[in-house]
């Protein structure tokens, strides 16, 4: 069994995360025919959490196309989309939104401004007023594309992925990215969703951020292993602290704050990355461990502090 010192030296997660945020990300064309039935249109919103920007996709081979996601409302996205629709004499039959986050739904008003008929063609798992609900396993079809909705919560409560049957491919939304790892709201649900996607055996992934995933099974396995490894790191940090404190009672020196846990695993990290990624990721795992009663928490001076539940076995 690895010691906490060994875990500190294993910075694979931290290096992967940082590498995904650098300017060394591969270039993605503003508009690209990824395959003969999938056109990627970039959202024009590159950033630390959006990578090269939000990927939106036109799917099909005929004049009618399914649009997956709408970017965050940057005007250049609508300009690019409208240009490709006019150049190729295409129209949008359905607008499928993977989840509610603004960098996926923000372009909806621009779509409606372009064509008011699109207001009645917008689908989301938990729909906004005037939108249609997406049901799990619901099928949307146009010439050359059969798209099946997959309810895959975890990153967001309403997250949907979409299976493209003709390519044995999945539009993974924010559940699986082309680079690095995603942020999760509910880790237990998220891991269930990853297991569901893995069971389908699809080979290709079209993520909402980053490059096309050519080996989706390997990427899913990497995601699952990374989350489980991080869970083990956090548990062992708490367990080692309890051991060093002489197995004091809960609420004493055997408890660590979230910040103290992060410091023991990652050392000092930049504040903006701490707040935007590391702290939320750590909290999601602590909540899952608490739900399974492997850890508990106490309040000390207004700070939430975590400790190992000694009645449970080691992870």
Image (spheres, rainbow, N blue to C red):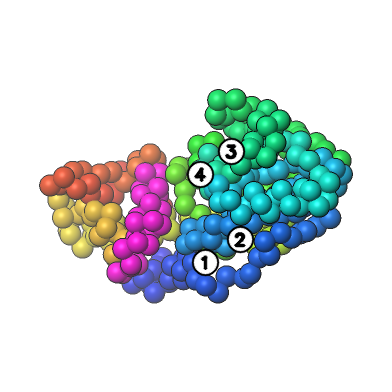
The spot of residue 37 in percent (x, y) is: 81, 51
The spot of residue 41 in percent (x, y) is: 68, 54
Instruction: Between label 4 and label 3, give the one nearer the viewer.
Output: 3
The earlier-in-sequence mark between 1 and 4 is 1
Cβ atoms at labels 1 and 2 below 8 Å apart? yes
The earlier-in-sequence mark between 2 and 3 is 3
Dot label at residue 109:
3
Quadrant hosting residue 35: bottom right
The spot of residue 175 in percent (x, y) is: 57, 49
Report helix, strand or loop for mark 2.
Answer: loop
Bounds of the magenta segment: 265-289
Cα separation, mark 2 vs mark 3, equals 24 Å
Cβ atoms at labels 1 and 4 below 8 Å apart? no
Report helix, strand or loop for mark 3.
Answer: helix
Residue at numbered disc 4: 102
Whether the magenta-drawn stretch holds residue 203 is answered as: no
Instruction: Between label 3 and label 1, give the one nearer the viewer.
Output: 3
Is 34 drawn above or below residue 108 in the view shown?
Answer: below
Residue at numbered disc 2: 210
The earlier-in-sequence mark between 4 and 3 is 4
Cα separation, mark 2 vs mark 4, equals 17 Å
Cβ atoms at labels 2 and 3 below 8 Å apart? no
The spot of residue 111 in percent (x, y) is: 65, 40
Cα separation, mark 3 vs mark 1, equals 30 Å
Quadrant location, the N terminus: bottom left
Residue at numbered disc 1: 20
Q: Give the residue drawn at x 40%, y 47%.
A: 284
The earlier-in-sequence mark between 1 and 2 is 1
């Amino acid at each position: 069994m690895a010691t906490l010192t060994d875990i500190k030296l294993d910075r694979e997660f931290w290096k992967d995360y940082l590498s995904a945020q650098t300017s060394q990300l591969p270039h993605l064309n503003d508009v690209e025919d990824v395959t003969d039935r999938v056109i990627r249109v970039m959202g024009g919103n590159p950033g630390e959490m959006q990578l090269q920007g939000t990927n939106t996709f036109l799917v099909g081979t005929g004049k009618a196309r399914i649009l997956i996601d709408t970017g965050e409302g940057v005007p250049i996205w609508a300009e690019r989309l409208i240009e490709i629709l006019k150049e190729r004499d295409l129209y949008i039959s359905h607008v499928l939104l993977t989840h509610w986050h603004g960098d996926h739904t923000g372009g909806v008003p621009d779509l409606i401004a372009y064509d008011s008929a699109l207001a009645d063609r917008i689908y989301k798992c938990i729909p906004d007023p005037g939108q249609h609900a997406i049901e799990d396993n619901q099928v949307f079809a146009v010439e050359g594309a059969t798209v099946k909705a997959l309810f895959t919560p975890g990153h967001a409560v309403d997250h949907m992925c979409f299976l493209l049957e003709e390519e044995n491919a999945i539009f993974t939304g924010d559940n699986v990215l082309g680079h690095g790892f995603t942020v999760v709201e509910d880790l237990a649900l998220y891991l269930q969703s990853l297991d569901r996607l893995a069971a389908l055996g699809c080979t290709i992934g079209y993520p909402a951020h980053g490059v096309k995933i050519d080996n989706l099974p390997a990427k899913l396995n990497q995601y699952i292993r990374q989350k489980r490894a991080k869970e083990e790191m956090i548990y062992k940090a708490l367990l080692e602290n309890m051991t060093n404190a002489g197995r004091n009672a809960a609420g004493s020196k055997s408890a660590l704050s979230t910040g103290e846990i992060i410091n023991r695993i990652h050392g000092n990290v930049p504040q903006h990355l701490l707040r935007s990624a590391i702290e939320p990721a750590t909290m999601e795992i602590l909540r899952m461990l608490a739900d399974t009663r492997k850890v508990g928490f106490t309040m000390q001076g207004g700070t939430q502090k975590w400790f190992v539940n000694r009645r449970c076995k080691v992870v």
